[in-house]
Structure formats: C-alpha cells, structure tokens
Image (spheres, grey):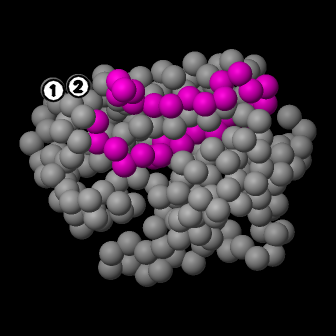
Amino acid sequence: MTYQPYFIEGVQRPSRWMVTCDHASNLVPPELGGTLGLPESEMARHIAYDIGAAGVSRALADALDAPVALSNFSRLVIDPNRGEDDPTLLMRLYDGTVIPGNRHADAAERKRRLDAYHRPYHAAVEEVAALHPKRVIVSIHSFTPQLKGRPPRPWHIGVLHAYDERLTKPMFHRLTAEGDLVVGMNQPYGGHLPGDSIDRHALQHGRLNVLIELRHDLIATPDQQQAWGRRLAPLLEAALADTHL
C-alpha cells in the first residue's frame, strides 16, 4: 500500500461538524526508515502521538454523522498542530527524550517534511472544511496524566480556546454540569498558538470551533474511546444549540 500522510473518512456525511485529530498516529513514514532512532517503548509514549485520540475521533465522527480527518505521521516527524514558523515544529528533545532522527535535520529536511506530510494534511483538512458553509470544527487531543518532574494533572478533560469562545464556553458549562468530571478551561495548555490547526482552519475563517483534550489514561482502550465519543456528541450538539448560531 502506498503511504499517505492523512486519512479522511466520511467526507460525504451531511453534518456541519467536522472532527480533526492532528496527533492521531505514531507512525514514522517508510522514507524515513520507519524509525527516528527511538525504541518502540518511546514511540508508544505521548511524545510520539496523542494516545487514544484517533479512536475517540472516529467514534465522535460516527455519532455526529460527520467527516473526520486524521494525520498519519508522528508529531516527532513534524508537528501538524504547529505553524510552519513555530520553533517546536520539529522537535529534537521532548519531555526528556532526545530524538536521534531529528538531531541533524537541517532547513532542507524541514522543508521536505513540510512538503511531504504537514502541508498535504492541512490541504486535505481545509478542502473538507470548506465543503459546508457553516462548518464547525472540533479537534480531539489527549494529554499525559503527568509530565516528567511535574505534578499530576487533575483534569479529566480540558476545553481550549483562543479569542473565539462562542462554542467553548457553552461546552465547558455542559461538561461541568455532568457532575463527575474535573474540567479545565485552557488546561492543561493554553488554547492558541499562531498557525496551529484551529487558527488555520477555524479562526482565520470565522468558523465555530472547540479543541478538546482528554487525559489519555481515560481513553486507553477501544471501549473507552467509543464511550467518550458517544458521550461527547450530545454535549457538543447541545453546546452548539446554546450558541444559536
């Protein structure tokens, strides 16, 4: 099978929703030798991808009857949720782990990876996003319960935003009202990096959007991923209705 840097599923689905998963895969493309010099144990960690996020994204897209876009390369290859000028686009050190395959990556290699993986993914996302005139983008990510040398993260789920809070505020309130969740607003990260996926495909086009971060120990299994997808869908629909947009 020929390698491709992304997957689009359900493109003909009628929903105004679109689900994106920027860090769906820990795959290193075959032209890079299928490895960046790291053992499998490191590539299975959160440094390489968002654990469980792909399964949640697919389950959520099914529940919303929406298309879903998933990257097919590790963020260690080049990070699709970073702008092209972001200094963390191509990481040489991540959460205490040196990335041997990136140590000598120069400007020419950076451009090659942009052309081969990053840009085709974003072109495909934008093509699908533009198919609906009132598109709403929900981006699914996951976070590790604890970074090395840092305190444990208490949140089950985070709702991230930049300056556009039209959908994130009602979604935050809907999640908080569930009663059994520790919900963070712009936790465990801030919600805006210039040139990131939400900026590129939502903010710059005036599209409603929300970025959801799930703690990855809660979505480690296929059953957990399905359950979260089914749980999030009606909450997102209700939050969208709350906006009257």
> Does 134 appear above or below 159?
above
Can residue 14 be found in the magenta stretch? Answer: yes
**Mark count:** 2
Can residue 120 be found in the magenta stretch? Answer: no
Q: Magenta segment, principal secondary structure?
A: loop
Q: Is residue 196 visible to us here?
A: no
Kindly identify which residue carries mark 1: 108
Region of the chain picked out in magenta, as a range: 1-29
Secondary structure beneath disc 2?
Answer: helix
Is 176 situated left or right of 5 in this image? Answer: right
Q: Are marks 2 and 1 in contact (CB under 8 Å)?
A: yes
Question: Residue 196: image x %, image y %?
Answer: 47, 39
Kindly identify which residue carries mark 2: 112
Q: Which mark is residue 158?
A: none
Question: Residue 199: image x %, image y %?
Answer: 54, 36
Quadrant the C terminus occupies? top right
> Does 53 appear above or below 30?
below
Q: Amino acid type of disc 1?
A: Ala
**Residue at 64%, 64% in the rendered image:** 224
**Residue at 64%, 62% in the rendered image:** 223
Cα distance between the residues tagged 2 and 1: 6 Å
Q: Amino acid type of disc 2?
A: Arg
**Residue at 54%, 53% in the rendered image:** 53
